[in-house]
Amino acid sequence: MAKILAVLYPDPVGGYPPNYARDDIPRVTGYPGGQTAPTPQAVDFNPGELLGCVSGGLGLRDFLESRGDTFVVTSDKEGPDSTLDRELADADVVISQPFWPAYLTAERIDAAPRLRLAITAGIGSDHVDLPSAIAHDMTVAEVTYSNSISVAEHAVMQILTLVHDYMPAHEWVTSKKGWNIADSVSRSYDIEGMDIGVLGAGRIGQAVLRRLKPFDVRLHYHDVHRLPEEVEEELGLIWHPDPQSLAAAVDVLSIHTPLHPQTQNLFDEELIGAMKRGSYIVNTARALIVDRDAVVRALESGQLAGYAGDVWYPQPPPEDHPWRTMPHEAMTPHVSGSTLSAQARYAAGAREILECWLDGRPIRQEYLIVEGGGLAGSGARSYTVAG
Ligand code: NAP
């Protein structure tokens, strides 16, 4: 019998379940490129339910307990006395979401002798120390594509929010009870005619480019692998050989690469300084891809006109994290990939991965990040490890 430890975000302050705004969600069975949505043998939840919090339990409790497995769910993940640290000692599987990451550091992996599998219910497994997972012959898997479109929609929304300067205008009518048109429009622009770039034209990056095309903008991108010529032609894409050339060419830059040694701290003072004055950055990838304090300084000096995103470090961030109070931001907590629509897919994907692993069947290649002592599947294409 296996012990599965899920580290999930706390329940809503108003209690569980919440009052849902809608009765159902559209059924998505596949993604661009032909990959199918998760195909577990069954699920024990109604799509559209809040599954990512402790009481939601990713809809896995009945399945696991009916098999005789132990299923422990907690949101308590910080510090040496945390439930995560205590329960990790004899856990076989850890499931966590990037929105409330269980940071599986090298020390934690060393302290978890039975740990064989880390599942990311979502996308992005940088919260797992991948070199340690490789050294311990663990499997790391994530639910590729499950929330890519959710994030792409959020990124487009944040690009429009920043450029139109939506946040201060909203504040004028709500908390300030005013009608200050001049104040509200003094930093407000259209994206029409702008140069917009995407760093990392993978699943999310390409979905952002496709969604932006009808806005009559010039679209740019940089990726380690250039997209097929027909895709570049269809979307009218301008390719850049490196992030520096991309950053210097655009008015708005949206970041969509994984966090790994090549991308960590890429947007430092120098690269942000090489952008046009008044550029915007939207980062729904990972916070550590940008230099936290360089972003704040650039917003204060006017080098950046705005910064938005939903990814922070650490998560949750401390109350005095400077991004909570910097000017010209449109930040959210890490929510873009955890819409109720996305949760139905990544909960089903976590179940599919567990079913395979518990039955000794192979996990889909596209879900694999680490397996067999090295990067594998999607991880072998998009990640690097230092050393
Ligand atoms: P993906 O399909 O693997 O796309 C990532 C792209 O980045 C790939 O095309 C990859 O290139 C490219 N890339 C990797 N390293 C690069 C580098 N050094 N320079 C330029 N391009 C590089 O992944 P995805 O589904 O689009 O997700 C991307 C990231 O978004 C995830 O890793 C995660 O960190 C983040 N994410 C955030 C949320 C959220 O809720 N905010 C949700 C999901 C994902 P090749 O594959 O061509 O080598």
Image (tube, rainbow, N blue to C red):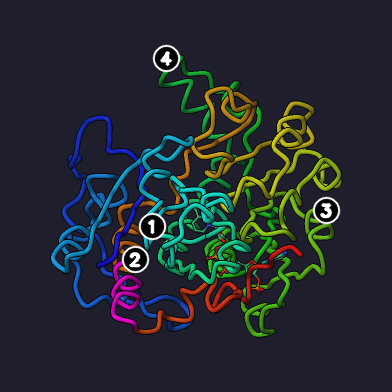
Q: Is residue 132 above or below residue 276?
A: below
**Left or right: 355 as drawn, with respect to 385:** left
Which residue reaches farthest top?
A: 177
**Camera-side residue: 182 or 259?**
259
Task: Give the position of the C terminus as an image quadrant.
Answer: bottom right
**Camera-side residue: 274 or 320?**
320
Within 10 angstroms of label 2, few (less than 14), some, or many (20 or more) residues?
A: many
Residue 236, horizontal then vertical, whole percent: 68, 73
Label 2 SS = helix
CA separation, marks 4 and 1? 44 Å
Total count of labels: 4
- The picture quadrant where one finds residue 134 is bottom right
Task: Give the position of the N terminus as an image quadrant.
Answer: bottom left
Q: Which mark is residue 177?
A: 4
Residue 294, horizontal then vertical, whole percent: 76, 36
Magenta extent: 351-360
Give the residue type at disc 2: Ala
Which of the two marks, 4 or 3, is nearer to us in this view? 3
Q: Circles 2 and 1: CB distance less than 8 Å?
A: yes
Which of the two marks, 2 or 1, is nearer to us in this view? 1
Precedes in sequence: disc 4 or disc 1: 1
CA separation, marks 4 and 2? 45 Å
CA separation, marks 4 and 3? 39 Å
Precedes in sequence: disc 4 or disc 2: 4
Label 3 SS = helix
The residue lying at 31 percent from left, 73 percent from top is 352
Residue 214 seen by the camera? no
Q: Is residue 81 magenta?
A: no
Residue 233, horizontal then vertical, whole percent: 67, 80
